[in-house]
Image (tube, rainbow, N blue to C red):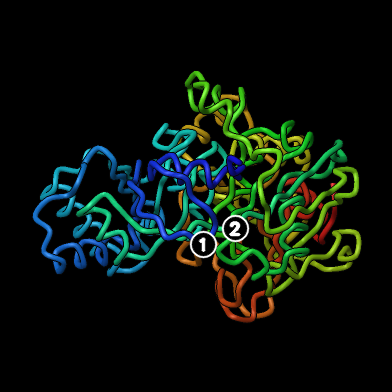
Amino acid sequence: MIRQHTVIEKIIGRNAGYDVKPGDIVTVSADRVMIHDIFIPFVSGKFEEMGFKNVWDPEKIVLIYDHLVPASTTDDTRHFREGDAFVKKYGLIHVHRSDGICHQLMTEQGYVRPLDIAFGTDSHTTTYGCVGAFSSGIGYTEMAGILGTGELWVRVPETIKIEIDGSFQDNVMPKDVILRIIGDLTAAGATYKALEFTGTAVLEMSVAGRMTMSNMAVEAGAKCAIFSPDEKTAEYCGIELTDEMKELKGDHDAVYERVIKYDAASFVPVCACPSQVDDIKPVSELTEITVDQVFIGSCTNGRYEDLLAAAEILKGKKIAPFMRLIVTPASRDIYRKALGDGLIDILMDAGAIVTHPGCGLCCGRTGGIMADDEVIVATNNRNFLGRMGSSKVRIYLASPKTAAMTALKGYISEA
């Protein structure tokens, strides 16, 4: 009897060249790797310490300056200098200097495609599952090893299948969906497992929405997340799907760790409450909470459709008195499109500060840091203590629609 497989098992098995099952330790060849500016000094130092003389394939390595730009401390420039030295010494080809957030660029620029295996020095590398790739975050020692050999061992994960059928309410966004799922699974409920998303509601999601879902899968502990590629994937990636890509679906009799089914109509706007990403409450239960600042952006929700959703709510209006609204597009291309279509004008006219693409506020580095006892509603992926300033800041995570309505009202509000 031929064993049936989940999507992740198919991708890993294809790369390894033999049949795999959960728990197997498999050496895979990387199709693409990403290093961002925070980690490049540690990666380059470990690479030299390991004694490598050349990188395995300059074409498959992407270096992205996004977390520390523009520099907010004098030490940040050391990361730039050491990164540039590594690029020159080893002939790296793909280098992005302030072009956008790493996880946006990796799919937007065509670096990761269906069936690929990709690794990055950031936990939210799980994002690339939105296009049907196995992608996962790793540490700088593992990355240094890949740079020298092109290979890394992985343990084949068990898969939790998330099936969502039906239609969502108009004020529900993919961010609300993944937050509720994280709340149900808990922050450790999918540790070292794959989350495979399927169902009629998932098929209706844009690739941008799928990116939000796969990006936050790691907040439930997931090793990776995966969506089967379809025509939306092909259009986004600028490719024609091969027969193998079209068949990249979980087999009917595949063995899953568990299957969780949802009715799409049951989802409502929600927030992750301070300071746990799995402390999920409906927005309707939080409407008396006054907010000091709203942030719309990050690798989770800085895409065009996120800015569009906010602009539709804020068009012709002004944000609440004493409110601070910061908007950060996820890439230059998104910024340019939003500018050309008038979305940036709408947001600015409403009172928003629009920043250059980057990770600054989300990772607590630059632009918009909060003080003791202030409250922020943000569309990024983490609300840990001290994440966006003081450890006494209260961070609520929400969708762009909820965030925009909150900026308008001055208190947590659903669209």
The residue identified by callout 2 is 158
Labels 1 & 2 near each other (Cβ < 8 A): yes
Q: Position of residue 224 (x, y in %)?
A: 54, 53
Which residue is drawn at the image coordinates 84% and 49% (left, top)?
262
Which residue is drawn at the image coordinates 71% and 34% (left, top)?
205
- The label number, if any, that marks residue 125 in the structure image: none
Mark 1 closeness class: few <14, some 14–19, many ≥20 residues within 10 Å: few
Which residue is drawn at the image coordinates 19% and 67% (left, top)?
45
Q: Secondary structure at mark 2?
A: strand
Q: Nearer the viewer, residue 413 or 239?
A: 239
Which residue is drawn at the image coordinates 36% and 58% (left, top)?
153
Please give the count of numbered marks on the rendered protein.
Answer: 2
The residue identified by callout 1 is 23
Instruction: Say which of marks 1 and 2 sits in front.
Output: 1
Q: Position of residue 380 (x, y in %)?
A: 61, 56
Amino acid residing under circle 1: Gly
Horizontal side of residue 187 vs 259, given as left or right:
left
Q: Position of residue 250 (x, y in %)?
A: 64, 40
Name the image quarter holding residue 13: top left
Q: Nearer the viewer, residue 105 or 12?
A: 12
Q: Secondary structure at mark 1?
A: loop
Quadrant of the snapshot with the N terminus: top right
Q: Residue furthest top?
A: 240
Residue 235 showing in the rendered view: yes
Horizontal side of residue 365 vs 139, given as left or right:
right
Q: Nearer the viewer, residue 206 or 133?
A: 133
First of labels 1, 2 by sequence position: 1
Name the image quarter holding residue 322: bottom right
